[in-house]
Image: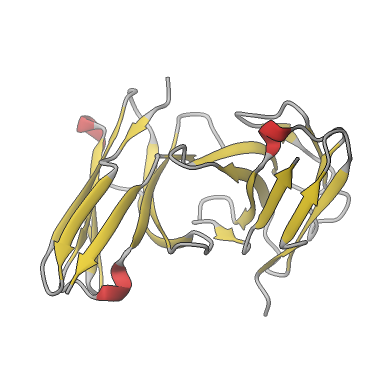
């Protein structure tokens, strides 16, 4: 199948660093994306890893290891506004679409 | 530059009624998608289109139809609404290999 696994909830305090993992239960896929969604809002694109390794965009970094079917989103210097759900998404082989994970709800505490 | 616009934002239907959800994008994207989002289940693809005049089934297509008569518009139709179709519907668009731009969503309740 094409199932993705993410932790359902993560809690951290302001200023801390948090890592949200995503694993994909199949062999091979093209790229890993991450999206942020605040309650009542639409998902917004954060990052895309086409190649293995670490991509950094400000306080957010995303990592991909295709051989391990694994990736993560790293959020540094957490702020209250980072409280949201985070979804990973992968493009399976021979597919023109991304498959989304179930999402991880991040709560940032003061 | 509006991005992706969905209408309506909210709708309540009675079982058996029909309706059309409208999605418009002004970014000249080739690819457009319709997803539904239910609690704890992430985003599931209903139908998608890789260009004007083309459509294809996604993961959960039953009970829905779509049309892409113009490149900028992607319509999602419910012919006979059922309570199981109560959900939040998101339209998205993209270039072939880029991230998605999502619309603000349509909250549909079928009673």
Q: Quadrant of the N terminus of chain B?
A: bottom right
Q: Taking the image as drawn, is residue B28 in sight?
A: yes
Instruction: Please state the total of marks drawn on the protein image.
Output: 0
Query: Observer-nearest residue: A69 or A9?
Result: A9
In the image, residue A106 above or below residue A88: below
* Image position of B54 (left or right of A5): right
Residue drawn at point x = 49 percent, y = 56 percent: B99
Q: Which x, y percent locates residue B35?
A: 61, 44
Quarter of the figure with residue A21: top left
Query: Observer-nearest residue: A91 or B60?
Result: B60
* Residue placed furthest toward the top: A1
Q: Which x, y percent locates residue B53?
A: 85, 44
Query: Observer-nearest residue: B85 or A99?
Result: B85
Q: Quadrant of the C terminus of chain B?
A: top right
In the image, residue A26 above or below residue A87: above
* Image position of B106 (left or right of A35): right
């Amino acid at each position: 199948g094409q199932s993705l696994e993410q932790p359902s909830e993560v809690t951290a305090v302001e200023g801390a660093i948090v890592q949200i993992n995503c694993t994909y239960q199949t062999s091979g896929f093209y790229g890993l994306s991450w999206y942020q969604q605040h309650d009542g809002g639409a998902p917004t694109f954060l990052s895309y890893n086409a190649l293995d390794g670490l991509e950094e965009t400000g306080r957010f970094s995303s990592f991909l290891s295709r051989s391990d079917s694994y990736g993560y989103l790293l959020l540094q210097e957490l702020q209250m506004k980072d409280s949201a759900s985070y979804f990973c998404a992968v493009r399976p082989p021979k597919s023109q679409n991304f498959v989304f994970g179930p999402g991880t709800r991040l709560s940032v505490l003061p | 530059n509006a991005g992706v616009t969905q209408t309506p934002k909210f709708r309540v239907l009675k079982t058996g009624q029909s309706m059309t959800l409208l999605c418009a994008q002004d970014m000249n994207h080739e690819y457009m998608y319709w997803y539904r989002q239910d609690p704890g289940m992430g985003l599931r693809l209903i139908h998608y289109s890789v260009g004007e005049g083309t459509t294809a089934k996604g993961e959960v297509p039953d009970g829905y139809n779509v049309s892409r008569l113009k490149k900028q518009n992607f319509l999602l139709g419910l012919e006979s609404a059922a309570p199981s179709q109560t959900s939040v519907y998101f339209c998205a668009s993209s270039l072939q290999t880029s991230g998605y731009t999502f619309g603000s969503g349509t909250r549909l309740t079928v009673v």
